[in-house]
Each structure stands twice: as structure tokens, then as C-alpha cells.
Amino acid sequence: MKIVLISTYELGHQPFGLASPAAWLRREGHDVTCIDTSQQALRDHESTIANADGIAFYVPMHTATRIAMHAIRRARALNPKARLCAYGLYAPMNGEMLRELGVEKIIGGEFEKELVEWVNVAPAQQQPPSWPRYSETISLDRLQFLTPDRVGLPRLERYAKLRLPNGEERVAGYTEATRGCKYLCRHCPIVPVYNGAFRVVQRKVVLSDIRQQVAAGARHISFGDPDFFNGPTHSIDIVQALHREFPHLTYDTTIKVEHLLKHADLLPILRNTGCAFVVTAVESFDDHVLAQLDKGHTRADFFAVVELCRETGLNLCPTFVAFTPWTTLESYEDFLNTIGELDLAENIPSIQLAIRLLIPAGSRLLELAEIQDVIGPFDKQALCFAWQNPDPRLDELQRELEQQIQTAAKTNASRPQVFAGVRRLTAAKLGKIIAAFPVLADRATIPYLTEPWYC
């Protein structure tokens, strides 16, 4: 069968969510075309889409799903007879909306096997067209993975790169050593699908995938695991093997604050095997907000992690949800002051200073009475529940900061320069005399990826 796999956005990486199922489908003898609309125009592939038997859309995150809505409509117009599937974290969460667009199969969790089974249903075996064929599956099967097949995807150099303090840029690859997560953070989109489960990608598969990306020019690898230390022994084994084989290759990981503390003895291994930086989802410095999000760490815990990473010589990249229904002007000012006091302005992607809490369908945040009090109806276009801060100045500040940060990005302003501007605007909202905040650097002093959206 002729199958088209479409990714609309995967955090600036060559789509793992296309390469992995492509390997499974091609093994079955299917003719697979992969299209990444973040790098390729859909109009250039209209004839392929028009002749496809099945079209599957990868929707791993909110932004990707919103873009996919338009791509699904276009694909349906080009090929009304094609069977449509949506797979990834946000597929089950938006199943009703996707069904309205004509998607017949929704797959969440471990999608490769389920996707093959959907494709392998021959037309003669299907129910009559007048019968409803829609089905939804969340699979947590323990799969024996295949090395992702990246043939036909745009070249790695077209995606996000690692930028070093000396200005050098390295082509970056991407892989996953584990999927899902042990934890149940209320705001996390992984939770409604995996519900505390995580799955290991076999060591030989991970290393094989990295080898082919190194052969394609990668000099840095991003591990996309929701938490690299969900399976610390497995992950450390992989990076040690990776370093032995490619001693000059660097990598980055994402690790929870509580895991950085719990597995402090493993941090020197990360440093010694080429870890360029560790992303950690801090979300807030406010202990009440952290408790509401069920993050599993406190303000004091994060302070301890900052010190621990500095002692180890490991670069830390914190991410945040800076604007929540509980944020006040005073707490946001404290947030900025704390970043300044910890000397972290250079470590934080500027957009993280303006991230607003997203409440998608199925979110555990909906369990909270405080959230029910502030949300409006579900917005099918925005794919989330709208909410407003009790103090309208916070919503106004968030919008202004987002615009200011986006404008600054176009001028290549440094992170500390952007941070200083954010502090000035916040002080003005508070009606304070604006001090001359120091700017620490006019260029990067730590490694970072050129794609700033981490979640």
C-alpha cells in the first residue's frame, strides 16, 4: 500500500515520529513517503498525497496538532478516498475533533505496531463505507523496536543546531532511549496517555540510530526522553557506550529536578561522556504552584540542583511555566529576581520567561477546583481551555512580553539582554522606578540549541 506519514512540527528536530514507524511499515513491504511540513511545503507533495491509500499524521504536541488540523483538511480535499490516521500524544486527547475532520484511527502511546496493523487492514476486509470505522487505541505494549528509517527525510543540517560559546555550530540529531514517564505531573500531556508508565527503547536500537545520524553529519544528539533518568541504568549505559564509540560527540538530556538530586552520583558521568547541558522542567519557584502542578520538587530543591550542577561542571537549562492562574505581579517579579540572583539568565531560553499554562483536553489540571473556577469552554481552534488570570494585568504583561521576546529574537539579542528588557517591562507594570539592570553578556557563554522550544 502507498502510505504517507506527515509531521508538522517536532521541536526543531528531524522527526523521529516519522522515521520510527517508517521502518516498521517498510519492513511490511509498504511504499512509505515521509513529509515534514516544517521543512517541506505540502503543495510540493500533492500528487503523492492524492495517490495515497493511507495518510497518517504525527501529533506529539499542541503546536503540531494545531498545524495538523489544516494539513488534514488539505489532505482530505486532495484525496477524499484515503484512510486517515492520527498518532502521538495529542491524538487521543483530541480524538473527537480529529474524527470530525475525517480521521478514522487514533493511536496513542506506543504507536508503531498499531499503525502497521491499521495499514495492513486490506480494503476488502474493511466494513462497508456506510458503517462507522472510527476507532481509538492507546497502546502501552512493550515493543521490540527497529532502527528508525530516516530515508527520504530532509537533511539533518536543515534542523536545529547546537551553538557553542565560540560561535561554532554543530549539526544536531535526535533520538529516544525511553518513552512515557513514571510521574503524573498535572500539566503534562504525557500523563493522560501513559498514566505513569514508561517504556525502554532497546540499547542496540538507540545506538544504531545514533550511528546513522553521525554518518549523516550529526555532531550532537538530543535525547528526547521525557525524563532521561526514568531508567537511569539504561540511559547511563547508552551514553557510556556512545562516548566510547564517538568520544567527540556531545548530547543533551531532560531530567527532573528530583532525579538530579536522587541520582547526583551519576552527574559526573554525564559530564565526562559529553553532556552539553541538561534541561530540567522547573516550572515555578512558588511552592504552592509546584504543589498544584504535582511536580515533586520544591523551590529549595531547585536551588540545591543549581549548586550541584555548578559543582559538577554540568550546564543546567531550566524551563518554566511562568504564567499560571496563581501568578501575581509580585510573584512574577520574584521569579525574575530569583533568576538574576541565581545568575541563570544565560541558561534560560528567553521564550521561557513568557510561557503561559496550557490546559488541553484530558489534562489532570481539570481535577483542581481552582482551575474549574477560572476556565472557560474548550476552544476547538486553540485546542485548549481558555483561562484568565484574576488580575488582568498579568494576561496583558504576558502578551506584551511574548511580543517583546519574539521581536528581540529577530535582532539576535542575547539572553541576558532580553532578560533585562523583561525586567524593565515588569517593573513598569508594578509602577516602580526602573533600575539599570546589568547585562552580563552580549553573546552565548554556554552551549544551546538554536530551536528554543523545549516543550
Image (spheres, rainbow, N blue to C red):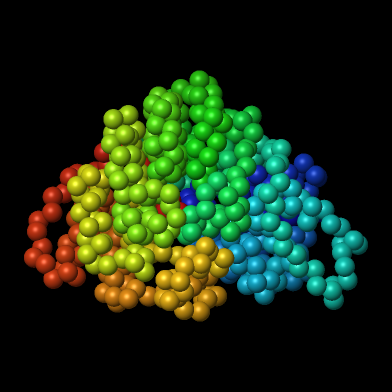
Image x and y of residue 363, in percent: 53, 64
**Which residue corresponds to the image point at 50% horizontal and 24% vertical from the top-left?**
240
**Which residue corresponds to the image point at 28% horizontal and 52% vertical from the top-left?**
412
Of 384 and 4, which appears nearest the observer? 384
Of 200 and 447, which appears nearest the observer? 200
**Which residue corresponds to the image point at 67% horizontal and 75% vertical from the top-left?**
100
Is 159 placed left or right of 136 in the picture?
Answer: left
Vertical side of 270 occupied by 78: above or below:
below
Is 349 placed left or right of 371 in the picture?
Answer: left
**Which residue corresponds to the image point at 31% horizontal and 65% vertical from the top-left?**
327
Image x and y of residue 210, in percent: 56, 33
User: In this orientation, does residue 34 appear?
Assistant: no
Q: Quadrant of the N terminus?
A: bottom right
Q: Where is residue 434, by image quadrant? A: bottom left
Residue furthest to the right? 124
Q: Where is residue 361, by image quadrant? A: bottom right
Image x and y of residue 81, in percent: 78, 69
Image x and y of residue 359, in percent: 48, 67
Of 262 and 212, which appears nearest the observer? 262
Vertical side of 217 occupied by 158: above or below:
below
Count of picture labels: 0
User: In this orientation, does residue 176 appear?
Assistant: yes
Residue furthest to the bottom? 377
Of 213 and 434, which appears nearest the observer? 434
Vertical side of 175 occupied by 438: above or below:
below
Q: Quadrant of the C terminus?
A: bottom left
Residue furthest to the top? 244
